[in-house]
Amino acid sequence: MAATLVQELVEREPEQARAAGRLDSPRLAALYEEHSRAIYYLALRLLGDPTQAEDATHDVFVRAYRHLSEFKGLSNIRTWLYRIAINHCRNLSNTWAHRHIHSGVDEAVWATLPDRGDDPLRVIEIKELGTRIQRALESLSDEYRLLLLLVADAELSYEEVGELTTQSADAVRGKLHRARKAFAIQFNKTA
Amino acid sequence: MNPLKTRLQQQAQHEVRQNTTQTPEARQFATAEELLRFDAAQTEVPPGVAERLQETIRQEPKPEPSWWQRWFQK
């Protein structure tokens, strides 16, 4: 599919497009090839719906296509795409009155819970894994959910996760421990 | 090369190798990120997304040629 996309884009007068700074066609195809899975997965887990995640992924790459010239290369391009995706998913969530209900348990309560949340997460039924993960994520605060999803991407450093969540890398490390614990507790409840 | 990134990439590759060699019935993940990484690796982008993207891009208005391109076309 990516090859077809490259061919399609190259056919669209790339010289002219490049001159206008709107499209570097093979670059967009390469972007899609390399990053679409990460963007789709983030959208899927933030929105909780495969159809909405498909729409969001499409919209993110259309936006990237239109604004590729604005990417200055000062940050990782994956970070740039993630930023578009996060903002887009937030807008969609607001538009669709899609807000998730928080568990209502604040950080102080998480901190007082026994440490079993740090136990390994044992998965028996791989088939139902996605559903369980989704349920566990939805029971977390928006902040913890996003933090875990971003940190799970091995291509992002803590500094880059901090950029995306507007906090320091140290703050990311600090919150990550609590987010892991909260997730583990919720995930084990879904068994 | 960012050493942190390298470490994370090596860790992710190690996890994928480890997970793919285990039986599908029972796996253990030390952290939420490992579990999410595994889940992400199992998740495919539906092919319809690329098709729609291609179609949308085809319908995008072509960018205006710059002044010097218009001048040379005269």
Image: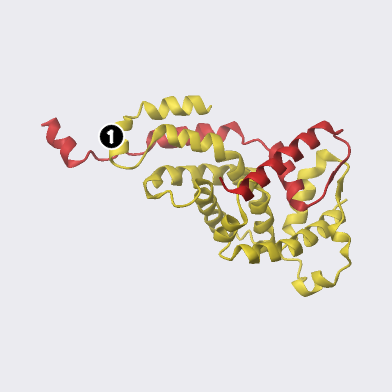
Chain colours: A yellow, B red
Task: Name the residue type under label 1.
Answer: Gln
Residue A41 rendering spot, x and y as whole percentages: 64, 44
Quadrant location of residue A140?
A: bottom right
Q: Is residue A85 above or below residue B73?
A: below
Question: Does residue A138 appear anywhere in the picture?
Answer: yes
Q: Is residue B65 above or below residue A168?
A: above
Q: Is residue A96 visible?
A: no
| Residue closest to the eye, B35 or A102 | B35
Horizontally, residue A121 falls left or right of residue A152, namely right
Q: Is residue A164 left or right of residue A152?
A: left
Q: Where the N terminus of chain B falls, by quadrant?
A: top right
Between residue A181 and residue B44, name the one nearer to us. Answer: A181
Q: Is residue A70 left or right of residue B32?
A: left
Q: Is residue A181 left or right of residue A35?
A: right
Dividing the image into 4 quarters, which one contains the C terminus of chain B?
top left
Quadrant of residue A62 in the image?
top left
Crowding around mark 1 (Cα neighbors within 10 Å: few <14, some 14 to 19, many 20+) is: some
Q: Which residue is mark 1?
A: A16
- The secondary structure type at the circle numbered 1 is helix
User: What residue sits 58% from the left and 42% below the top?
Assistant: A54
Q: Chain of mark 1?
A: A
Return the residue found at the far left.
B74
Q: Observer-nearest residue: A66 or B5?
A: B5
